[in-house]
Image (tube, grey):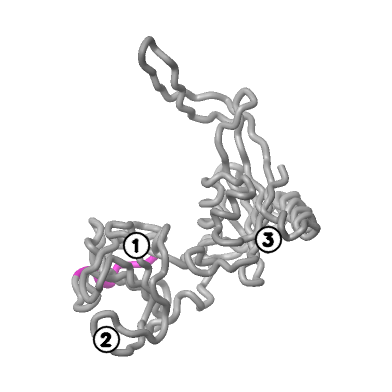
């Protein structure tokens, strides 16, 4: 059993009283499969997967897949996750335990592993950490308005090399660092407007431009962790509307961040592999069974959950 916080609402006379309570809940494992037809949420909704699990799926594979751009019709997923119940009633979803996502014909896997049963993280089925050295995107939710390469500049009206990716988003949307590093520049820079440049290990750096304002504490020399708030989307500098201009640089040269193979974190040490294989073996088997199950379904029925 797991202790879960819940909101209890009771009628009191002509009104209601709400209070937060803690109750023991039972934990079960559910499995689901789905195929992308229009969007990730469309497929997971059809498969009966809670939104919190969908968001975990995107977060877990955020170093491998840009879920704002890279999804393709026909992509498939298989997922094993926890749910909790109280007195037989659904009380919320828990952690994703294992995941397989086929994106553009390439298979990505993930499984939760805790060596000490206290703290843990996600690894692929080969034991390589999925806490990538870089995330694919700096925004949690958005849409891309233009991609890397040649385009007509929206202000100068001339063809120029667009040295990054623009993510259209409402003004004020939080911007997060895609990797650990040190702030190399923070302030105003001509066409970039309010911009932050973060230097990462080795030859890598990233740039986040057109911010409405830069977050407190993001000053030159500050140490930055992956996912840390850098600032907020705006339209400062040469921008016609609110968006984030993001650059991924190698040796100070912009590289297409949507296509480059980003560096990944370490793999498990040899001494940890045996415990890893024993712990994740059952999840691999579940994913394999889900794969076989999904392959037997008629095309029209692939957005279903097997519970």
Q: Earlier in the sequence, mark 2 or mark 1?
A: 2
Residue 44 coordinates in the image, percent (x, y): 59, 51
Q: CA distance from mark 2 to mark 3?
A: 48 Å
**Is 62 or 304 nearer to us in this picture?**
304
Q: Badge 3 local density, few (<14 within 10 Å), some, or many (20+)?
A: many
Q: Characterize the magenta stretch by its predominant secondary structure.
A: strand
Q: Badge 1 local density, few (<14 within 10 Å), some, or many (20+)?
A: many
Q: Is residue 179 visible?
A: no
Q: CA distance from mark 3 to mark 1?
A: 35 Å
Residue 194 coordinates in the image, percent (x, y): 22, 69
Residue 216 coordinates in the image, percent (x, y): 23, 56
Dot 2 lies on which element?
loop
**What residue is pinned by disc 1?**
169
Q: Quadrant of residue 111?
A: bottom right
Q: CA distance from mark 2 to mark 1?
A: 22 Å
Q: Which residues are magenta?
A: 179-187
Q: Residue at x 68, y 60 (%)?
A: 125
**What residue is pinned by disc 2?**
157
Instruction: Check residue 125 in the rendering and tell me which mark sits there, or answer none.
Output: 3
Q: Residue at x 71, y 57 (%)?
A: 300
**Is 146 or 236 nearer to us in this picture?**
146
Q: Quadrant of residue 239?
A: bottom left
> Disc 3 or disc 1, which is closer to the eye?
1
Numbered-mark total: 3
Vertical comparison of 204 with 132: above or below: below
Check residue 185 for magenta coloring. Answer: yes
């Amino acid at each position: 059993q797991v202790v879960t916080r819940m909101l209890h609402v009771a009628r009191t006379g002509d009104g209601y009283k709400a209070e937060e309570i803690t109750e023991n809940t039972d934990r079960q494992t559910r499995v689901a499969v789905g195929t992308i037809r229009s969007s990730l949420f469309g497929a997971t909704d059809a498969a009966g997967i809670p939104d919190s699990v969908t968001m975990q799926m995107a977060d877990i594979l955020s170093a491998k897949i840009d879920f704002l751009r890279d999804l393709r019709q026909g992509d498939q997923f298989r997922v094993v996750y926890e749910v909790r119940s109280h007195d037989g009633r659904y009380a919320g979803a828990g952690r994703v335990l294992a995941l397989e996502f086929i994106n553009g014909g390439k298979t990505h896997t993930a499984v939760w592993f805790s060596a000490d049963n206290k703290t843990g993280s996600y690894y692929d089925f080969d034991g390589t950490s999925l806490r990538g050295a870089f995330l694919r995107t700096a925004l949690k939710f958005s849409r891309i308005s233009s991609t890397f390469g040649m385009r007509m500049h929206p202000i100068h009206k001339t063809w120029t090399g667009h040295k990054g990716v623009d993510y259209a988003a409402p003004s004020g949307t939080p911007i997060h660092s895609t990797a650990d590093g040190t702030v190399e520049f923070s302030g105003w820079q001509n066409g970039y407007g309010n911009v932050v440049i973060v230097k990462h290990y080795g030859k890598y750096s990233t740039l986040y431009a057109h911010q409405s304002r830069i977050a407190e504490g993001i000053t030159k020399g500050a140490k930055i962790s992956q996912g840390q708030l850098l600032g907020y989307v705006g339209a400062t500098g040469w921008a016609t509307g609110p968006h984030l201009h993001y650059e991924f640089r190698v040796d100070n040269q912009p590289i297409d961040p949507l296509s480059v193979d980003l560096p990944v974190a370490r793999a498990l040490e040899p001494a940890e592999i045996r415990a890893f294989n024993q712990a994740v073996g059952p999840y691999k088997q579940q994913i394999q069974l889900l794969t076989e199950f999904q392959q037997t379904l008629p095309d029209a029925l692939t957005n279903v959950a097997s519970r």
